[in-house]
Amino acid sequence: MQDKRPTVADLLAMKGKRQLSMLRVETLEEAEAAQKAGIDMLSVPPEVLGPAFREAVPTCFTFPGLEYGEFVSAEEYLRAAFKALKAGGDAVWCAASLQVIRRLRDEGVPVCGHVGLIPPKSTWTGGFKAVGKTLETALLVWRQVKALEEAGAFSAEIEVVPADVASAISKRTSLFMISMGAGAGCDAQYLFATDVLGTNRGHVPRHSKVYRNLAAEYDRLQQERIAAFSELAHDIKSGAYPERRHLVDIPKGELDQFLRALEAE
C-alpha cells in the first residue's frame, strides 16, 4: 500500500478509490508471506501479535479479532482490545453488540463490525447461506451498516451478500467496507489464507479462490516423516544405529582408570 503502515484515516481516505487486499492468516509465517507478497491488510488471532509480528510485518494494517463469545461484558472486550492494540494491532474486528462497539469507540478503539452472514449469529438469518437476496434481508444488511455507523465503527466486513446489494450499500455509507464474498463494489477483498493456499480440508466457500495445493505437499511431508521415523525404529532394533561416528570416545587410559574406580566402589 505504501512504505509506512497506514492509519484508519488513510484507509478512509482511500474509500472508493481502489480495492485493497486482505487475508486472514493464522501464523507468523503466513503473515510474513503476506507482507512480502504486498497484501494490504491482515486479520489475525490476537496471540499472533507482538514484537516479532511487527518486525516481520511492518506495513500491513492489521485487525486482531475479538472472537464473539470469548468475552461477555463491554469491559472485557475493551481490555482485550487495548491489549491487542498495544501488541501491534491497528484496529479490532468485533461482532458484539452495538453497546460494546459504542464503548470501544468511546475509548478511541477503531472497530470493524460485521454484517450480512455473521457466522456466530447465522441462526438468525437461516444458517450458513447468503443474506440479502430479498428486499427484506437486503434492507436488514443496510440497517446493520447504518447501526454500525451510528455506534462509531469505522469499517465493516460484509459477508456473502449479493454483489449489487453490497455495492449499493458501500456507495452510501461512510464505513470502509470489506467484502468477503460480496463482490467488487466494496473497498477491500478479504479471503482466508487457508483457502488461498489449499490447506482447508473442509468446505471451500464459493467466493474463495484456491491458488495452491499445500495440503498435498503437507501430506507428502507427513509420509516422509513416517518413513524417516520407521527407518530410525528399524535401525535401533537392528543395531544399525548408533554407528561409531555417532559416539563420543574417551581416552583408553581414562577409561581404564574409570573402570578400576568402579570396581573399587
Image (spheres, rainbow, N blue to C red):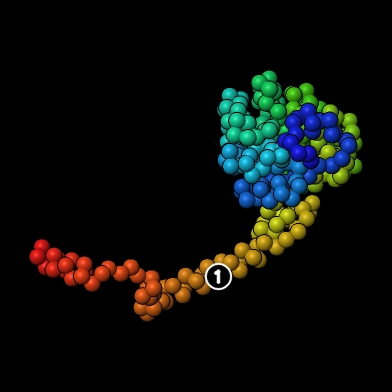
Q: Give, as a three-letter code, the residue at label 1.
A: Glu
The number of callouts visible is 1
- Return the x and y of residue 55 as percentages of the image width and height: 62, 41
Residue beneath the point at 62% across and 51% down: 29
Q: Is residue 41 visible?
A: yes
Within the image, what quadrant is residue 131 found in?
top right
Residue beneath the point at 71% across and 39% down: 59
- Out of 212 and 114, give the one closest to the viewer: 212
Residue beneath the point at 26% across and 69% down: 251
Mark 1 falls on what kind of element? Answer: helix
Quadrant placement of the N terminus: top right
- Return the x and y of residue 34 as percentages of the image width and height: 71, 48
Within the image, what quadrant is residue 215 found in?
bottom right
Quadrant placement of the C terminus: bottom left
Asked if residue 245 lies left or right of residue 12, the reply is left
- Return the x and y of residue 220 as percentages of the image width and height: 61, 69
- Out of 134 and 202, give the one closest to the viewer: 202
Instruction: Write down the residue under mark 1.
Output: 224
- Out of 10 and 129, give the one closest to the viewer: 10
Density class for disc 1 (Cα within 10 Å; few <14, some 14-19, many ≥20) is few
- Return the x and y of residue 83 as percentages of the image width and height: 58, 30
- Out of 112 and 48, give the one closest to the viewer: 48
Q: Is residue 162 visible?
A: no
Against 18, is 9 above or below?
above
